[in-house]
């Protein structure tokens, strides 16, 4: 504890929610988030000012330091004095690479404000838009820092007027995104403006920065900044150091946090309905609105770490009540109880033991039973619904087959994989029952590369296959014939089904969480009827949602349906999780249960009879609807000097890419395109070599699109052979029965 001088001040400020600011730093990769954080930590005395900018303190993992790239979000708390008052700033530094965008989503649930960092030369990039969209979906208020202003002077040699024009373009772009994604009531008042102090400029590497008000206060102009970078190298170094003393970066940034970002009591009032579906007038709802430390406990777990000494450590935001050592809590989603053994404050890689942490703060807890990210903690015996599910911007679309190099390491392999998937919900691990393969899925090549490195760190040597792309299976048209019948293996039960394709807007509503199996039936019925025009019976009788697929019960007047419906749901889930074309997940299916006949003797209607009776006609009907394989498509944006634009376009087209737009921006060209994930491997090396390292690019998951007809059967054959299946998909008649 002695390492952090401000601990006692932090603990005092935790009780005053008016003086707390929970904030995150978000940006595109390499735009300077962690470098900026160093200046803020130096101001708090956590690191020395001399090493700030190079220390990258919040990149505490060895690989992060090596690659100079944030992989894990990092929490730290610091105190800042502003206008005669002390404020507690709980800060989360987040990753910028698209492969780790899931970590950004989780971090944003815990904060109320976000500092968006943009490189002055590159401007807002694809990932800038993604992280800002994520923040605004969570009702997190943004402010803006335009970083690397020194590059405009040293590299582009811009005049003060040209620099201001560049800034104006960046601000207009950020405000257009706020207008697009912000909640309706905040589209105007959350716009960032130079004149009101919600925009700052500076250089995180050289530790200087200012807002307009701070410039006036210190008597600084852009001409002074340009002068500081003019002259011989020794002279420039001296002048830049002097500039960092006149306008130290930490001061305007921390002032912005205190003045322009909301306190928990302001933010929870408007965030509550977005992130928690409970009754605002219930005791828990009132406690959340008031940020009441004495109210009922309500905490959302946003991150999990598995510590060799403390076990599972759950980190999250306390929205109501207080977490303290020894308290018995209820895990709402997993329906379990647990006792808090220890309460911590997270200080980057360290955890500081404290007695308790009240509402409005971020806490770390050990001693709880195994739990998942997104878990809701309440007082034992309290009634409260769980928080809304976290909405990720991308799916895990790249898979590798992985196995321990030595078979005797299987127990360690099991332990390490369990730890990694617990800490990172965007890693999916499954065992293919038919082939015996261990399949690990992630957001991209880098995500899986980092995972392999973490396995090695844990002392586990593994063999990994080349990346495998995950596909989806869907239908080209709705089923038009009579209901397809399936019989149970003992022939005593019968089920009739039909299949339709869900409209894309319904699929998007499922993916965004607006429609879910967990929500109240009346609310789901209202959305499906009024927004998507569904018939009342279908809207009311959605009984299961798995992935982006729905099960609708149209059965009327039959006996014993309630007794076997859970087995039918299990059969439906099996059918859509591993569909029939290539054993890939189904996408956008509406499966309708039309009729059923069930044997009156319970011994003849167990799961072994009902589940095959369900998935067989679903697969048979699916194969009658002109099935298609869908592949994941990436959106691609690249900023490149105009002399290299033809090389970028050639690279895109060679990879089955489609050029969408070509925009000129001063001396740079912006290439906007999309390409299949299957063709994206090795893209980074090719772009670097073909543009002499002068291209700045980003990719992110965009959508699912049909594999071209000319390639469908070949891709299906390759997938089936890799999975140890026969090369050709089965015929429909293999799965359904005649009367």
Image (tube, grey):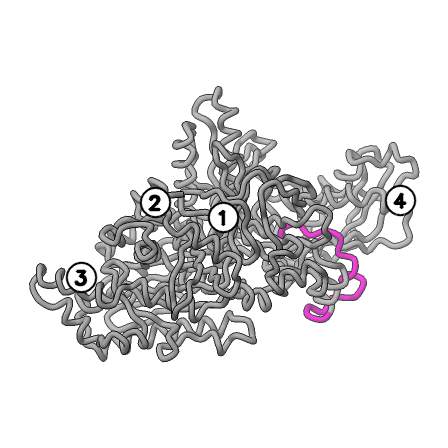
Q: Which circle's residue, 3 or 2, is located before the other in the chain?
A: 2
Residue at position x 48%, y 32% in the image: 309
| Whole-number angstrom distance, CA of label 3 to CA of label 2 | 27 Å
Image marks 3 and 2: residues in contact by CB distance under 8 Å: no
Q: Position of residue 602 (x, y in %)?
A: 89, 35
| Whole-number angstrom distance, CA of label 4 to CA of label 1 | 41 Å
Name the quadrant of the C terminus.
top right
Mark on residue 241? 3
On screen, 703 above or below 415?
Answer: below
- Label 4: how many residues lie within 10 Å, few (<14), some (14-19) or many (20+)? some
Question: In the image, is 734 to the left or to the right of 409?
Answer: right
Question: Dot 4 corresponds to which residue?
Answer: 560
Name the quadrant of the N terminus.
top left
| Residue 155 in sight in this render | yes
Asked whether residue 540 is drawn in magenta, I would say yes
Q: Which circle's residue, 2 or 4, is located before the other in the chain?
A: 2
Of tags 3 and 4, the one toward the viewer is 3
Question: Dot 2 corresponds to which residue?
Answer: 64
On screen, 436 above or below 505?
Answer: above
Residue at position x 38%, y 36% in the image: 453
Q: Which circle's residue, 4 or 1, is located before the other in the chain?
A: 1
Question: Dot 1 corresponds to which residue?
Answer: 397
Of tags 3 and 2, the one toward the viewer is 3
Q: Position of residue 251 (x, y in %)?
A: 32, 65
- Label 1: how many residues lie within 10 Å, few (<14), some (14-19) or many (20+)? many
Q: Which circle's residue, 1 or 3, is located before the other in the chain?
A: 3
Q: Position of residue 520 (x, y in %)?
A: 74, 59
Mark on residue 19? none
**486 vs 727, nearest the viewer:** 486
């Amino acid at each position: 504890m002695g390492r952090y001088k401000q601990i006692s001040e932090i603990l005092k400020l935790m009780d005053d929610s008016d003086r707390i600011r929970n904030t995150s730093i978000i940006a595109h990769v390499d735009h300077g988030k962690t470098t900026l954080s160093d200046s803020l930590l130096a101001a708090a005395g956590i690191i020395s000012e001399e090493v700030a900018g190079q220390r990258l303190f919040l990149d505490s993992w060895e690989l992060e330091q090596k690659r100079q790239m944030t992989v894990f979000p990092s929490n730290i708390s610091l105190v800042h004095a502003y206008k005669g008052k002390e404020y507690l700033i709980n800060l989360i530094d987040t990753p910028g690479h698209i492969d780790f965008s899931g970590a950004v989503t989780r971090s944003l649930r815990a904060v109320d404000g976000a500092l968006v960092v943009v490189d002055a030369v590159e401007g807002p990039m694809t990932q800038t838009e993604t992280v800002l969209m994520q923040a605004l979906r969570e009702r997190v208020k943004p402010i803006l820092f335009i970083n690397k202003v020194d590059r405009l002077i040293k590299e582009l040699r811009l005049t003060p007027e040209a620099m201001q024009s560049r800034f104006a373009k960046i601000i207009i772009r950020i405000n257009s995104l706020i207008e697009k994604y912000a909640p309706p009531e905040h589209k105007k008042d959350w716009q960032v403006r130079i004149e009101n102090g919600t925009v700052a400029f500076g250089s995180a590497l050289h530790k200087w920065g200012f807002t307009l008000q701070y410039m006036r206060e210190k008597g600084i102009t852009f001409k002074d900044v340009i002068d500081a970078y003019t002259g011989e190298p020794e002279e420039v170094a001296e002048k830049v150091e002097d500039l960092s003393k006149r306008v130290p970066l930490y001061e305007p940034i921390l002032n912005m946090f205190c003045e322009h970002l909301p306190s928990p009591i302001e933010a929870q009032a408007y965030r509550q309905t977005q992130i928690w579906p409970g009754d605002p007038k219930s005791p828990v709802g009132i406690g959340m609105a008031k940020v009441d430390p004495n109210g009922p406990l309500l905490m959302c777990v946003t991150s999990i770490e598995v510590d060799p000494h403390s076990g599972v450590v759950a980190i999250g935001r306390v929205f109501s009540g207080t977490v303290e050592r020894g308290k018995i809590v209820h895990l709402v989603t997993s329906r379990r109880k647990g006792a808090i053994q220890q309460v911590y404050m997270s200080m980057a890689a360290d955890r500081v033991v404290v007695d308790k942490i009240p509402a409005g703060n971020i806490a770390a807890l050990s001693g709880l039973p195994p739990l998942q990210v997104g878990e809701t903690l309440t007082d034992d015996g309290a009634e409260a619904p769980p928080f809304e599910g976290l909405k990720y911007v991308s799916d895990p679309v790249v898979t590798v087959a992985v196995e321990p190099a030595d078979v005797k390491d299987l127990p360690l392999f099991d332990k390490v994989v369990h730890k990694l998937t617990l800490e990172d919900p965007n890693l999916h691990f499954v065992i293919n029952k038919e082939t015996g393969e261990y399949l690990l899925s992630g957001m991209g090549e880098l995500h899986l590369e980092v995972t392999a490195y973490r396995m090695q760190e844990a002392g586990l040597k593994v063999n990994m296959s080349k990346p495998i792309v995950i596909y989806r299976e869907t239908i080209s048209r709705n089923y038009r014939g009579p209901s397809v019948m399936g019989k149970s293996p003992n022939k005593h039960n019968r089920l009739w089904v039909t299949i339709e394709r869900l409209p894309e807007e319904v699929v998007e509503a499922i993916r965004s969480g607006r429609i879910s199996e967990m929500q109240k039936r009346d609310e789901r019925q209202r959305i499906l009827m009024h927004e998507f025009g569904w018939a009342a019976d279908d809207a009311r009788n959605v009984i299961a949602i798995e992935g982006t697929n729905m099960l609708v019960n149209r059965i009327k007047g039959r006996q014993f349906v309630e007794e076997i419906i859970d087995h039918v749901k299990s059969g439906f889930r099996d059918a859509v999780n591993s569909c029939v074309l290539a054993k890939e997940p189904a996408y956008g299916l509406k499966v309708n249960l039309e009729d059923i006949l069930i044997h009156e003797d319970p011994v003849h209607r167990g799961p072994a009879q009902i589940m095959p009776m369900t998935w067989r006609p679903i697969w048979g009907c699916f194969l009658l609807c002109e099935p298609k394989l869908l592949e994941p498509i990436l959106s691609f944006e690249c900023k490149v000097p105009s002399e290299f634009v033809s090389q970028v376009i050639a690279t895109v087209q060679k990879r089955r890419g489609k050029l969408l737009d070509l925009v000129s921006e001063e001396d740079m060209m912006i290439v906007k395109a999309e390409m299949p994930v299957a063709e994206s491997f090795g893209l980074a090396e090719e772009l670097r070599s073909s543009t002499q390292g002068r291209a700045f690019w980003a990719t992110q998951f965009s959508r699912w699109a049909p594999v071209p007809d000319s390639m469908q059967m070949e891709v299906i054959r390759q997938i089936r052979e890799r999975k140890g299946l026969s090369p050709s998909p089965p015929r429909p008649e293999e799965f359904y029965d005649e009367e």
